[in-house]
Image (tube, rainbow, N blue to C red):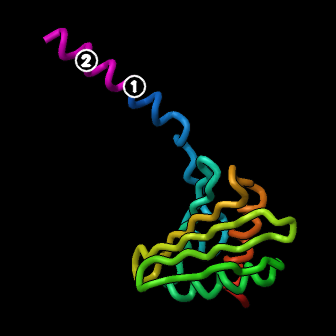
């Protein structure tokens, strides 16, 4: 019985240590239309309160308005990926996934290792395109 408790405690510690980095990384969106976002291991994951195709169109418009060159853009009914280059030549990938009829998850990765500030700027531009007044 004691052995089982020790194993459970050790397993709990390992799981807690493995999950320590992402703890607290899901933040409130802070703006209309964003359900939340997180930045983890070089990618910014955002959940927009908008249908998949509207989010797709907004992501394409945002990249163009930010002066990025679209190299590839493909989608089906539930997933899609946009690959662009920034003016400095760094790559950007934007992956979209249908979550519900009114929510779309988007993962933004700038550069090979990630750039949090640039990713947030793209997130904000997509939000602006989605929710123009």
> What range of the chain is rendered magenta?
1-13
Q: Residue at x 26, y 22 (%)?
A: 8
- Helix, strand or loop at label 1? It is helix
Which comes sooner in the sequence, label 2 or label 1?
Answer: 2
**Circle 1 crowding by C-alpha within 10 Å: few under 14, some 14–19, many from 20:** few
Q: Is residue 10 left or right of residue 133?
A: left
Q: Which mark is residue 86?
A: none
Q: Is residue 109 above or below residue 128?
A: above
Q: Residue at x 51, y 70 (%)?
A: 105
Q: Quadrant of residue 4?
A: top left
Left or right of 81 in this view: 67: right
* Residue 92 against residue 114 in the figure, above or below: below
Number of residues whose C-alpha sits closer than 10 Å to that of mark 2, classed few (under 14), some (14–19) or many (20 or more):
few
Asked if 64 appears above or below 124 in the picture, the reply is below
Q: Would you say residue 128 sits in the magenta stretch?
A: no
How far across and how far down the image is residue 116, in percent? Answer: 73, 54
Quadrant housing the C terminus: bottom right
Give whichever of 21, 133 is nearer the camera.
21
Instruction: Point out the residue furthest to the right here.
Output: 88
Q: Quadrant of residue 69?
A: bottom right
* Label disc, if present, on residue 7 of the rendered structure: 2
The location of residue 120, given as percent across then percent down, is 72, 62
Q: Where the N terminus falls, by quadrant?
A: top left
Magenta: main secondary structure: helix
Return the residue at label 1: 14
Residue appearing at x 71%, y 88% in the figure: 132
Residue at the limit of the structure toward the top, as seen here: 2
Q: Percent from the top left, x then y, of residue 14? A: 39, 25
What residue is rendered at 55% in x and 37% in y? 21
- Farthest residue toward the bottom? 133
Q: Is residue 8 magenta?
A: yes
* Label 2: element kind: helix
């Amino acid at each position: 019985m004691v052995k089982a408790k020790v194993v459970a405690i050790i397993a709990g510690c390992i799981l807690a240590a493995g999950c320590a980095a992402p703890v607290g990384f899901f933040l409130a969106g802070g703006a209309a239309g964003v359900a939340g976002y997180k930045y983890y291991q070089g990618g910014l994951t955002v959940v927009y309160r908008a249908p998949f195709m509207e989010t797709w169109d907004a992501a394409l418009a945002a990249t163009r308005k930010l002066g990025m060159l679209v190299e590839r853009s493909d989608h089906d009914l539930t997933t899609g990926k946009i690959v662009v280059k920034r003016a400095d030549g760094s790559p950007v990938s934007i992956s979209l996934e249908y979550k519900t009829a009114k929510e779309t998850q988007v993962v933004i990765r700038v550069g090979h290792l990630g750039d949090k500030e640039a990713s947030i700027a793209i997130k904000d531009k997509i939000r602006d395109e989605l929710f123009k007044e």
